[in-house]
Image (tube, coloured by chain):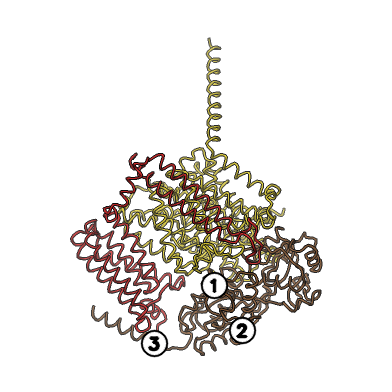
Chain colours: A brown, B red, C yellow
């Protein structure tokens, strides 16, 4: 009995000494802050699988949705040891967690890796009378706040895209909030709302199947799916370039104070993973635009998004904590 | 049976009052929600306001509470109602044996969930949880419960106090002190239970129960951590030990 | 011709799968794994499918699909085991099964109950599958009819049904329980405007109260406390009765089975609503349509068949809009969507063109999974029933540990555990005072749906209630609600009994006349 206790004590003491091995020597956990099956989740699973093959250890993807804008998942991931064995799978919507009162830090506590984003597109119900963006916006200008529009949840990136489009063109829609992109797309299909703004990746299958009619891309370039050519909204309304594009940024992050060696290894594996055929093909098939920024550059992009989101939400009167209190600069 | 039903109606009367108060609270909170102006970019009208459902639920609760009160009053009568109040306030009921057993049955998971899980290694915490339940209810009969309750109450109180208060102080210096303390507490419970069950046992085999307790915990922890890949709430010394076996870091 | 061609391809795929050893091995092992996942409280079908998604990432698509679908079918069925044996639902979908299954187990008919649930689940899965293969355009069209008004009416119907369920004591206690459930559903940030309701400043409440901790807290914790405090003794080993239900009984229950399956498929096809709602609505409908509604809640066959058929038929119903529109019909189907995207299959309207036989493959797998589930279930039944002979006071703490770690695994949230205990104590107090728990759980599940959709529907129609009468599905739902409400009123019941009496009196007079006439003739 005494010998057993002695051995246990020795092991407990020896523990920290045994930890000094090359990173990574154990499985890594990727905590995705959004629900299973969603864009962020699938993206993280695909890239994590490739990174796992490159690093030689398993990367286990788990979902921890909840709180506001993924605050619960971010808090959990940030609360684990900052040794690089816990990654957080997040997206641009998470930048609103601070001002909505779920989180008490800014996004600069993360060292992010941005995988990809999908450009936003505005579509209408197939049997609606609007054939081009011009028709829709002119109708909206003629009867402000009557044409019903959906864009995912209130304060989501798609909502921001809709608001930016309204600002840049002078049209005003009646915004109907839904719990996410998918329900708002459903509503557009059933005719409950007239138009919907969500990402191309989410709408692609419905557009190809003729369940939604795309009017324009909310980015400088147009896009072509199958035989359908979707023009850019900037063509008819160059004024939009002042407010758009607001691109998605889906990816992962580690706390900014992990050891430099961890950051280097992860960045290397990340870049290699993005270059693999599997990821490239997946992005192409699902209409994602690969970003690939890591570290400094990615942080800057997140900071920009954070400013934009925080101050827009303040205007919409949905913030719990003022952006100034958190030290977020104006966009 | 009639007596029991009357008693229930008496209790119903007080419950009805409680429900009405709760309903009033809900309605009050509801009126504090934005009924006009816009919020979140959406213009508010009465049917859009977030206050719609709370007011509906609150009013419903008030009406139902009143209904319950009136049924209680009608069927039990004023006398019974006063008797229920008297019995509830009497000192005897609060400390009777059935109430103690109920408190113990609730205190064990409460201790586990609120104090142990966030602070102590999952395996050790679970062993203490399982053992407390088995020790107090399975191994011993009612007299044995009386003998064990002092040790259980004291041990649990001390452990919780130590973990909550001192935990903050020593978490940097000695990361596994909490685990050790809980393990010590478990050993004390085991030894005391051994003694008492010898006298007031319910016939349950002692070592087998202890073995089952430990085996169940280890099997579940291994399944969840290594097969289902679920990161456990607190991964202390035992789980780190298992990790090192898994990754052969000896 | 087209149908024959499709049937031919279907049987071809079926035959091919039935003789491939890898497929058979995967079917059996994943169904068994699914049953275990379903049976353990706290572990859900969604978690099981999520886990297998990660594990099968490297496999070929059709093998991965076999594994995932078998797990899904097994898990939805497996929940009934713990519902019947220990009165703690293994999954939310099996909560309704506990209402009939546990009383049956207490009477010593656990084996028969499991036989019924197994057969009902298998038949439900197959009927759901039939809808998938033959009527998928109809199901998708049905799903597309649902806008906010229809969702609200459906949620309202579900909540109304919960008020008609068995009440151990006063009827108004059931309503109170439902309203408490509705209150719990209100906690969190409202879904339309993100205004925090009843969160008292806790950011953990922002997402609302999860259903799993409420379910385990409401069903599991009172059961555990009751067992421990009352020192329950293990049941005796009863002589093994016949597990497989008689064929004649199944035929007689066909009406019940078909109705429940239709409800299951219908609700499954609606996005966001899953197997649990299907089971409750089907249970309520069965009670309303039954000739002996008072038997519900005491362990009656009709109830258990209704719930299990519906929740398994829901699987087929959920997969149809998933594959044809890319809209998953239930939470595990949403996980399935993620899994398919990982294998580079994008469900949606283009699926039929890019992968023409995909729907048939899925149908074949579902059929085989249903058969496998039946075989595994019936074989396991005799052994699983022996759980009842374990000393409950030893068994329950381990079940408690499982519940706790299970509900933690779902969202990795210790806060969920914090919620579980107070809800459990409240549920225990309610049970002791004669309040039914089922309406509370239904309120928590359907409350958010009703609230959000009513407000959004009114937002879209700008305060106008007319769309209820102009939209066909909404109109039908509205009349069903009125009918259900009216049938519960004492006035209606008296009318019905009086009419029934008059009819019987008439019949007796008729028979008396005939007999008198016969006599008359003979004389």
Distance CA(mark 2)–CA(mark 1): 24 Å
Left or right placement of residue A157 versus residue B201 in this view: right
Q: Secondary structure at mark 2?
A: helix
Which residue corresponds to mark 1?
A: A101
Which residue corresponds to mark 3?
A: A18
Distance CA(mark 3)–CA(mark 1): 40 Å
Residue C367, image x and y in percent?
A: 57, 56
Distance CA(mark 2)–CA(mark 3): 34 Å
Chain of the residue where label 2 is placed in the rendered structure:
A
The answer to whether A228 is drawn above or below residue C237 in the figure is: below
**Among numbered discs 2 and 1, the one appearing first in the sequence:** 1
How many numbered callouts? 3
Chain of the residue where label 3 is placed in the rendered structure:
A
Q: Nearer the viewer, residue C13 or A99?
A: A99
Task: Give the quadrant of residue A194.
Answer: bottom right
Which residue corresponds to mark 2?
A: A298
Residue C301, image x and y in percent?
A: 47, 44
Q: Nearer the viewer, residue A214 or C189?
A: C189
2 or 3: mark nearer the eye: 2
- The residue positioned 37% from the left and 85% from the top of the image is A15
């Amino acid at each position: 009995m005494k010998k057993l206790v002695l051995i246990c004590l020795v092991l407990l003491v020896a523990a920290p000494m045994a930890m000094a091995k090359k990173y990574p020597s154990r499985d890594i956990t990727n905590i995705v802050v959004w629900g299973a099956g969603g864009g962020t989740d699938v993206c993280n699973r695909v890239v994590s699988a490739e990174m796992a093959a490159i690093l030689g250890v398993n990367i286990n993807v788990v979902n921890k949705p909840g709180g506001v804008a993924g605050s619960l998942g971010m808090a959990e991931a940030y609360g684990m040891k900052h040794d690089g064995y816990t990654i957080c799978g997040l997206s641009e919507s998470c930048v609103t967690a601070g001002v909505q009162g779920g989180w008490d830090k800014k996004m600069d506590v993360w060292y992010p890796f941005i995988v990809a984003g999908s450009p936003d597109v505005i579509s209408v119900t197939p049997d609606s009378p609007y054939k081009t963006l011009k028709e829709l916006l002119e109708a909206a200008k003629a009867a402000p706040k009557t044409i019903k529009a959906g864009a995912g949840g209130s304060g989501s990136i798609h909502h921001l895209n809709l608001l930016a489009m309204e600002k840049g063109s002078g049209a005003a829609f009646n915004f109907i909030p839904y719990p996410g992109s998918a329900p708002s797309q459903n509503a557009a299909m059933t005719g409950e709302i007239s138009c919907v703004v969500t990402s191309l990746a989410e709408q692609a299958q419905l557009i190809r199947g003729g369940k939604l009619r795309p009017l324009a891309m909310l980015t400088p370039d147009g896009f072509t799916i199958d035989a359908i050519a979707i023009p850019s909204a900037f063509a008819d309304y160059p004024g939009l370039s002042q407010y758009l594009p607001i691109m998605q940024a889906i990816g992962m992050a580690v706390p900014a104070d992990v050891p430099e060696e961890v950051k280097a290894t992860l960045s290397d594996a990340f870049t290699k993973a993005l270059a693999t055929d599997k990821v490239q093909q997946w992005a192409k098939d699902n209409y994602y635009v690969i970003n690939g920024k890591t570290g400094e550059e990615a942080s800057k992009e997140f900071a920009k998004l954070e400013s934009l989101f925080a101050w827009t939400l303040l205007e919409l009167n949905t913030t719990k904590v003022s952006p100034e209190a958190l030290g977020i600069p104006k966009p | 049976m009639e007596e029991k039903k009357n008693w229930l109606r008496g209790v119903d009367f007080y419950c009805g009052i409680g429900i009405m108060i709760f309903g009033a609270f809900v309605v009050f909170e509801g009126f504090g929600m934005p009924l006009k102006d816009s919020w979140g970019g959406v213009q508010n009208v009465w049917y859009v306001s977030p206050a719609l459902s709370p007011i509906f639920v609150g009013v419903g609760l008030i009406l139902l509470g009143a209904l319950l009160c009136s049924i209680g009053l009608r069927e039990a009568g004023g006398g019974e109602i006063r008797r229920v109040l008297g019995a509830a306030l009497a000192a005897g009921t609060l400390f009777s044996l059935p109430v103690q057993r109920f408190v113990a049955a609730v205190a064990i998971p409460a201790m586990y969930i609120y104090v142990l899980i966030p602070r102590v290694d999952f395996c050790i915490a679970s062993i203490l949880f399982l053992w407390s339940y088995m020790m107090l209810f399975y191994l011993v009969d009612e007299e044995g419960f009386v003998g064990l309750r002092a040790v259980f109450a004291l041990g649990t109180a001390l452990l919780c106090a130590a973990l909550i208060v001192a935990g903050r102080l020593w978490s940097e210096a000695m990361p596994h002190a909490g685990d050790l303390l809980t393990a010590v507490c478990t050993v004390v419970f085991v030894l005391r239970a051994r003694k008492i069950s010898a006298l007031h046992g319910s016939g349950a085999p002692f070592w087998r129960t202890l073995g089952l307790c430990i085996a169940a915990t280890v099997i579940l922890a291994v399944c969840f951590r290594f097969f289902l890949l679920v990161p456990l709430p607190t991964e202390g010394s035992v789980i780190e030990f298992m990790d090192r076996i898994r990754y052969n870091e000896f | 011709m087209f149908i024959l061609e499709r049937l031919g391809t279907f049987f071809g795929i079926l035959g091919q799968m039935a003789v491939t050893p890898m497929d058979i091995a995967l079917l059996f092992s994943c169904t068994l794994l699914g049953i275990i996942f379903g049976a353990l409280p706290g572990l859900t079908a969604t978690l099981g499918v999520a886990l297998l998604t990660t594990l099968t990432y490297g496999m070929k698509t059709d093998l991965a699909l076999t594994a995932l679908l078998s797990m899904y079918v097994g898990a939805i069925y497996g929940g009934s085991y713990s519902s019947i044996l220990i009165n703690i639902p293994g999954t939310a979908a099996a909560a309704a099964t506990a209402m009939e299954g546990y009383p049956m187990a207490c009477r010593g008919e656990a084996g028969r109950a499991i036989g019924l649930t197994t057969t009902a689940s298998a038949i439900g899965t197959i009927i759901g599958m039939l809808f998938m293969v033959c009527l998928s355009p109809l199901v998708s069209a049905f799903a597309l009819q649902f806008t906010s008004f229809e969702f609200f009416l459906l949620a309202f119907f579900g909540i109304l049904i919960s008020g008609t369920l068995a009440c151990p004591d006063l009827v108004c206690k059931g309503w109170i329980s439902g309203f408490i459930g509705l209150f719990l559903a209100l906690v969190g940030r409202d879904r339309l405007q993100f205004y925090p309701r009843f969160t008292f400043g806790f950011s953990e409440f922002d997402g609302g109260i999860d259903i799993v901790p409420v379910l385990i807290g409401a069903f599991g914790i009172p059961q555990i406390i009751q067992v421990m405090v009352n020192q329950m003794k293990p049941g005796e080993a009863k002589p093994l009765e016949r597990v497989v239900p008689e064929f004649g009984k199944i035929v007689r229950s066909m009406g019940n089975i078909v109705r429940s399956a239709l409800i299951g498929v219908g609700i499954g096809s609606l996005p966001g609503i899953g197997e649990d709602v299907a089971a409750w609505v089907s249970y309520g409908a069965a009670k309303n349509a039954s000739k002996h509604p008072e038997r519900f809640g005491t362990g009656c066959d009709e109830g258990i068949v209704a719930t299990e058929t519906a929740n398994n038929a829901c699987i087929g119903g959920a997969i149809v809009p998933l594959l044809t529109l890319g809209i998953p019909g239930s939470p595990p189907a949403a996980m399935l969507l993620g899994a398919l995207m990982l294998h580079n299959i994008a469900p949606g309207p283009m699926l039929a063109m890019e992968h023409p036989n995909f729907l048939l493959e899925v149908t074949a797998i579902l059929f085989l999974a249903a058969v496998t589930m039946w075989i595994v279930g019936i074989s396991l039944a005799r052994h699983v029933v022996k759980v009842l002979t374990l000393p409950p006071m030893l068994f329950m703490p381990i079940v408690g540990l499982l519940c706790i770690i299970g509900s933690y695994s779902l969202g990795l949230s210790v806060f969920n555990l914090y919620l579980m205990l107070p809800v459990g104590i409240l549920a225990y107090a309610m049970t002791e005072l004669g309040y039914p728990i089922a309406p509370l759980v239904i309120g928590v599940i359907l409350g958010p749906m009703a609230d959000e959709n009513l407000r959004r529907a009114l937002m879209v129609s700008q305060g106008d209630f007319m769309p209820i009468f102009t939209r066909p599905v909404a109109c039908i739902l509205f009349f069903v609600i009125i009918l259900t409400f009216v049938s519960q009123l004492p006035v209606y019941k008296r009318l019905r009994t009086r009419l029934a009496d008059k009819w019987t009196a008439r019949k007796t007079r008729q028979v008396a006349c005939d007999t008198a006439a016969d006599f008359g003739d003979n004389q």
